Every structure is written in C-alpha cells, then in structure tokens.
Image (cartoon, grey):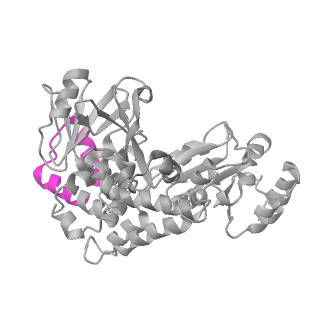
C-alpha cells in the first residue's frame, strides 16, 4: 500500500548530515511494512534484526564493554558488515534494549556511514520512561499515523478521484453531485475501516461489501494494544487505570461540557489519580489530545487553558469498534448525536496526520470552535458539521471578534467559498487537503 511517509524516508536518505532514524507510531499502523519496503527498494544491502528474537544483542548492549567493542561484536552477531556502502540496518522492537537506544549517539558520532532505522511497539512509551541517557540531537524522529483518507482512496484505486478533489479544493470548484455522493460514500466506508492497513486490506478484498468485511480485525487490534500495555506498565493498578481512561473516551466525547472530565472515568476521581495514565495513552499514540485556547494569538501554546482539553481516539475505525455501532447504521447516518462526534474525531485524526497540533477555542460564554490550525495564513478556525447544516453562531462570533484571513467549515456540503463571510466550505472527504504550508 502506498504511504505518504515514504517521501519522508527518502528525504532522510538524501540528507547530507546523517542521523539514525526512529519511526514512532501507534501499533499496527504499518511501520514495519513500509520501512521494509523502503529498505528493499532504496538500498543494495538490507539487514533486519528484531530484538524480540535476538536476546543476545540485548545482552551485548547491557554489558560493560566499551561502545567500540560492542559495535565490533554487534556486526559479528548480525553476520554482515553494516559499514558496507549502500547498506541499511533496520532494528525492529528496539524498545527492548534501552542501552542500544543510548548507543545510537555513538553510531551517529563515530559511524555516521551506517544507515539505521529503528521502530518498535509502544516505543514512545518507553522513551517517556527512559532511564538511560537518550541521544538528544543525535536521532531523527518521524511520526507515523494510520492511513489517512487520501491513502485509503489510493489503496482503493481512486487516484482520479484524489486528483479531482485536489483540483476542486484549490480552485473552489464544485465537484458535481454524482461524484460528491460517491466520495461521501467512500468517506462512510472509511469510518468503518479506519486507517489500519489490515482493516483496509480486508475491505478491499471484499470489494467494498461491508457484510463480508471482518469487523473482528479492529477488535483484535484493540485487544493487542492492551496485551502489549502489560509489558510497559509498572503495576497492575496502572494498567487498570489506563484501561478505565481509554474506555471512558466514547462517553467523554459526548460530554455536554465538551471537555475531558476525570469524573467520567470513576466517581470522585481527581487529575492526580489519572495524569500518568493520560501520559501513557498519549505516548502510545492511542489517543489524540486537543488543547483549549482562551485567546487565539500566536503562539497558541502561550494562551492555553491548561486544565481544559479533549481526547480523541487515534483511529476512527477503532472508535466505531469501541462504540459497537452496526456498519449499516454508519452507512445510513443512523447514529443521531454520535454522527457529529464521529465526524469531529475523524477530522482530528486527519489534521494530526498532516502534521498539525490540535487546538480548539472556547470563550467564557460557551462559544466554541472545534479546531484552530496554525499555517502560513495565520490562525484559522475550523468548524466540523456531520451534515449540510451551515449555520454556526460560534464560528460567526469568532470571525467577528478575531477577523481571521478566512475560516473553514467542514461538512457534507460541496466545495465553495463565500467572500462575504470569508468561510471556505470543504467536504468531509477533502480534509486531507488542509496543509500546514
């Protein structure tokens, strides 16, 4: 499957100053697959090592040998001279060796001719709890996310539709009723599969027949998350707390207060009881945090209400799996209140995939704009509607108060731009076109 991160891998390969690369991302988002494809396609020699299967490497790097001695023995264990020209080394499950992660500094400084890519399950959780010396400034980090809607379309051989969406977005042109309906139907199909490659592959194999689609795939992925979690928590109590927070999120998203509330996790809960659980979930990339902005000025980080935030599920398919919604109800929009919640979560995942940090605006009078994005045009308000309803008191109030260059309304309506209101209309299926540059 074609993944956008491939271009970032190529850019890393072509850098003049080389650093080992670490790819972070939620489990089963396709990290190993795309890294292997890149290594096989772009290098003459490809060496792959999985630390789950090579305890001798872990033992070596836990030893008291010098860095140079470890490096010499590491090459022997690999059975290949990784200093050969046009060679790439992929270390999978590197979180199993904290000492080897630390040694990436040595690779960078003393053996910069060695090309190394690292990845692993819950690697970012490991890094947050790192006890050794992390090689700050000596490692290039890339974040990888589940497949976005554009990648979903390409996987379904809809490249012509992608090109048309891009043209209509750039030129504010109508896409035509028939194509618009087709694209919305594909959007609904994506709500079922989400962006996990295995899930998308299964839907493609059924030729879009949702009745034949194996909905247990997403349930199994979710189960595997929590099975992995037990390896990277300190106590059983911590594991239970993380589970409670995560499984509270569908309820949190429908919360009338439009913010995360600890009381929804357990009765009388306080922030101090669950802060570490939230940190764990963020580090695992299982959730996406959107921060509340009081005053939409640059920099947004300087004007936060730090006690107020939202949490989204990182993959829309997994959210719908958690909600246990019948696929037919998604396709027919028979999901009442949650239709808007699902659309908002979908937009959050697409913005994150495009490199945006998540923010939203809320004032003292309860006016609220779903997202604020910061790009070359400044701070832009973004409102999400699950249907074609176009009235918005909050967005209009924001525009009147802060006078942004333009605003974005995402909905089931066609492309368009109103110069009077300065609102750019973007269909839900075109969110992938909202860029930082």
- Which contiguous range is marked in magenta? 160-186
Q: x, y (%) of residue 385?
A: 19, 46
Q: x, y (%) of residue 340?
A: 22, 51
- Residue at 36% in and 48% down: 261
- Residue at 22% in and 56% down: 338
Decide whether residue 166 is among the magenta residues.
yes
Q: Residue furthest bottom?
A: 212
- Residue 344 vertical placement versus 371 (above, below): below
- Asked if one can make out residue 135 in the rendered structure from this viewpoint, the answer is yes
Q: Is residue 64 left or right of residue 301?
A: right
Q: x, y (%) of residue 112?
A: 74, 43
Image quarter in which the N terminus is found: bottom left
Q: x, y (%) of residue 415?
A: 17, 41
Decide whether residue 130 is among the magenta residues.
no
What predominant SS class does the magenta segment belong to?
helix
- Viewer-closest of 175 and 55: 55
Image quarter in which the C terminus is found: top left
- Viewer-closest of 220 and 264: 264
Please identify the quarter of the rendering in which residue 305 is found. Answer: top left
- Residue 140 vertical placement versus 338 (above, below): above
Q: How many marks?
A: 0
- Residue at 51% in and 48% down: 279
- Asked if one can make out residue 161 in the rendered structure from this viewpoint, the answer is no
- Viewer-closest of 254 and 148: 254
- Residue at 25% in and 41% down: 167
């Amino acid at each position: 499957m074609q993944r956008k991160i491939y271009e970032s891998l190529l850019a890393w390969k072509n850098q003049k100053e080389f650093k080992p690369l670490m790819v972070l991302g939620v489990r089963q988002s396709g990290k190993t697959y795309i890294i292997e494809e890149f290594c096989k396609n772009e290098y003459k020699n490809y060496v792959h090592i999985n630390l789950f299967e090579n305890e001798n490497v872990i033992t070596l790097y836990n030893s008291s040998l010098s860095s140079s001695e470890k490096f010499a023995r590491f090459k022997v264990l690999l059975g290949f001279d990784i200093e050969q020209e046009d060679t790439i080394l992929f270390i999978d499950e590197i979180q199993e060796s904290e000492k080897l992660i630390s040694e990436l500094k040595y690779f960078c400084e003393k053996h910069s001719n060695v090309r190394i890519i690292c990845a692993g399950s819950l690697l970012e959780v490991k890094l947050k709890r790192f006890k050794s010396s992390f090689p700050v400034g000596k490692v290039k980090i890339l974040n990888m996310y589940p497949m976005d809607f554009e990648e979903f379309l390409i996987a379904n051989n809809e490249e012509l539709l992608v090109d048309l969406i891009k043209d209509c977005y750039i030129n504010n042109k109508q896409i035509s009723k028939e194509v618009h309906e087709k694209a919305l139907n594909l959007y609904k199909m994506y709500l079922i599969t989400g962006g996990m490659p295995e899930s998308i592959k299964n839907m493609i194999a059924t030729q879009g027949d949702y009745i034949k689609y194996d909905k247990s795939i997403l349930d199994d992925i979710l189960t595997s998350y929590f099975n992995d979690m037990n390896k990277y928590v300190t106590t059983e109590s911590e594991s239970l707390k993380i589970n409670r927070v995560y499984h509270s999120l569908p309820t949190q998203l429908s919360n009338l207060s439009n913010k995360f509330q600890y009381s929804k996790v357990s009765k009388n809960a306080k922030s101090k009881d669950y802060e570490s659980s939230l940190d764990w979930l963020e580090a695992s990339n299982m959730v996406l945090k959107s921060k509340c902005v009081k005053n939409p000025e640059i920099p947004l980080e300087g004007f936060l209400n730090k006690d107020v935030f939202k949490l989204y599920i990182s993959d829309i398919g997994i959210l719908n799996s958690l909600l246990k919604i019948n696929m037919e109800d998604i396709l027919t929009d028979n999901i009442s209140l949650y239709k808007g919640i699902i659309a908002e979560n979908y937009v959050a995942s697409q913005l994150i995939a495009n490199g945006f940090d998540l923010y939203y605006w809320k004032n003292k009078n309860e006016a609220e704009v779903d997202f604020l994005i910061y790009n070359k045009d400044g701070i832009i308000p973004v409102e999400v509607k699950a249907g074609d309803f176009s009235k918005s008191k909050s967005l209009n109030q924001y525009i009147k108060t802060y006078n942004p260059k333009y605003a974005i309304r995402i909905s089931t309506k066609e492309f368009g731009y109103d110069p009077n209101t300065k609102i750019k209309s973007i269909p839900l299926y075109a969110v992938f076109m909202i860029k930082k540059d």
